[in-house]
């Protein structure tokens, strides 16, 4: 899931990305990345879970907390060139 928060008066433009996937050893991984929009690198954290349900539950909990702090869920899709992206706000 891709989330962004913008507060131009504070020069705050942040992103938050979450993903759940299975690693090569069969564990379920909950990945989250965050940072300033447009920055090359941000920070990241991964947590391992035994079941997909636990990992998805953790993702849902984190995304709800971010929504309470003003982050909005966005959808990214390539538009013509690979370096150009369009954003669409997705209502929950």
Image: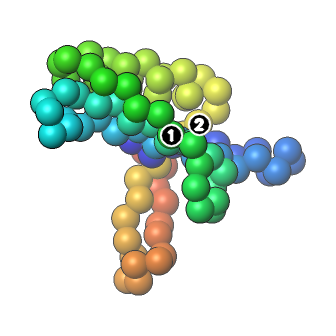
Q: Tell me: 10 left or right of 57.
A: right
In the image, 49 versus 67, the foreground residue is 49
> Which residue is found at the position 15% from the left and 40% from the top?
24
Q: What residue is pinned by disc 2?
A: 71
Q: SS of the residue at dot 1? A: strand
x and y percentages locating residue 88 in the rendered image: 46, 56
x%, y% of residue 45?
Answer: 47, 34
Q: Residue furthest right?
A: 9
Q: Which of 44 and 71 is in front in this view?
A: 44
Q: Is residue 52 left or right of residue 15?
A: left
Residue 81 placement (x, y as % from top left): 41, 83
Residue drawn at (59%, 49%) of the image? 42
- Tag 1: Cα neighbours inside 10 Å, few (<14), some, or many (≥20)? few
Give percent across and percent down for residue 87. 49, 60
Query: Is 79 drawn above or below residue 43 in the view shown?
Result: below
Mark number displayed over residue 44: 1
Note whether 81 is above or below 39 in the view shown. below
Name the image colouring: rainbow
Q: Which of marks 1 and 2 is nearer the N terminus?
A: 1
Q: Residue at x 20, y 17 (%)?
A: 50
**In the picture shown, does residue 84 fall above or below 8?**
below
Question: Which quadrant is home to the N terminus?
Answer: top left
The reply to whether residue 64 is visible in this rendering is: yes
- Using the image as rendered, state which of residue 84 and residue 31 is in the foreground: 31
Indicate the quadrant where residue 72 lies. Answer: top right
């Amino acid at each position: 899931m891709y989330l962004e928060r913008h507060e131009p008066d504070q020069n705050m433009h942040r992103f938050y990305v979450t993903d759940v996937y299975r690693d090569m050893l069969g564990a379920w991984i909950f990945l989250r990345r965050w940072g300033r929009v447009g920055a090359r690198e941000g920070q990241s954290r991964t947590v391992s879970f035994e079941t997909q349900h636990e990992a998805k539950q953790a993702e849902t909990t984190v995304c709800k907390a971010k929504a309470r702090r003003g982050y909005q869920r966005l959808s990214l899709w390539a538009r013509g060139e690979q370096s150009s992206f369009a954003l669409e706000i997705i209502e929950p």
